[in-house]
Image (cartoon, grey):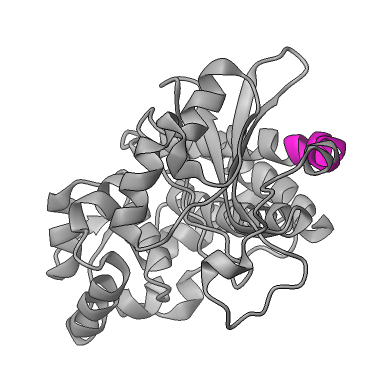
Amino acid sequence: MIRSFSVHPQSILKVKQAWRNKSQGRDRELAEALGLSLDTLNHFLKGQPVKGLNFVELCQVLELDWQDVAGLDSQQNLVFDSPIEVGEFLAYSYSHGVSAVDQALQTLVRTLCQLLGRLTRKVGNLLRADRTSIFLLDRERQELGSLIAEDGDGGSLLIDIPANKGIASLAAFSLKVINIPFDVYDDPRSEMAQKTDRRTGYRTYTILAWPLLNEKQDLVAVVQLINKLKSNYQPEDDLVKKIDSRGFTGDDEVLFAKFAPSILQILERCQFCYQLAQKLRETTDIQPGSLREIELVEQLQRQERQLQKNLQRL
């Protein structure tokens, strides 16, 4: 069974305040974006046991150290800087009461989030987008979605679930680039963008949504860039004054197409790891010490090392 954790009594007030700041009253929407039920969220906020992976993910979203929140010794969190022998890892996990698969999966998810967050910022900077999102395709469910990647100073957004609506999903369905110039609100396809803006307080003026296809012409992900910025804008200006009224140009599309293959290579690895994580998040029948557990740990560590290599190259 995958271990559960609970918020330590001394951390409950801190956790509740962090959640209020993050959710801004949108508890249900943010919980759904994380793929969690409101019951799971309420258990977490009340200091009741929550499945280990959900606990770690919630702490990451709140920018809190999960071991500190759980009142655990920080050494219980394994971060691998080099390949380790699986037997030693299993022995460590058993001695500390932590599932080996759970621990290896936590490391993979953390690295995946770091890689996706850095990649969104890189892509946004490439085309001077104020906001960037990357939506991975969940092939089994045939819908867009992803793990969470935190906002960065470069302006990348939470990688979210568009619920089969919005410009990103239109690009995914048509397999065609969608480029909407200033002003997006004049486009009849912008209904979802307007709803999102009303909820977040942000304002979308221009959008470029780009579906990334593999060699078989299957969709891997959609990159969505929002609000092309002027090259000489002033940081203190209002957003509308920063926006390049031409939107994303043909030259921008040529530039993105040039770098798309290298972006796609990274995202294919992310897609595989994302789907692996999705499957294992709900797995509860892995017996400690079994061949199945050893194989899963080896696979998770192998994938995590590949993500680390991609992360170092960015």
The span shown in magenta is 255-265
**Which of 306/113 is in front?**
113
Q: Which x, y percent locates residue 197? A: 36, 54
**Which of 114/273 is in front?**
114
The stretch drawn in magenta includes residue 292? no
Task: Locate residue 246 relative to residue 144 in the image: left or right.
Answer: right
**Quarter of image, res 25:** bottom left
The N terminus, quarter of image:
top left
Q: Main secondary structure of the magenta part?
A: helix
- Residue under the point 41% across and 80% down: 73
- Residue under the point 67% across and 38% down: 267
Report if residue 292 is visible in the image: no
The stretch drawn in magenta includes residue 264? yes
Task: Locate residue 17 relative to residue 76 in the image: left or right.
Answer: left
Report if residue 30 is visible in the image: yes
**Which of 98/6 is in front?**
6
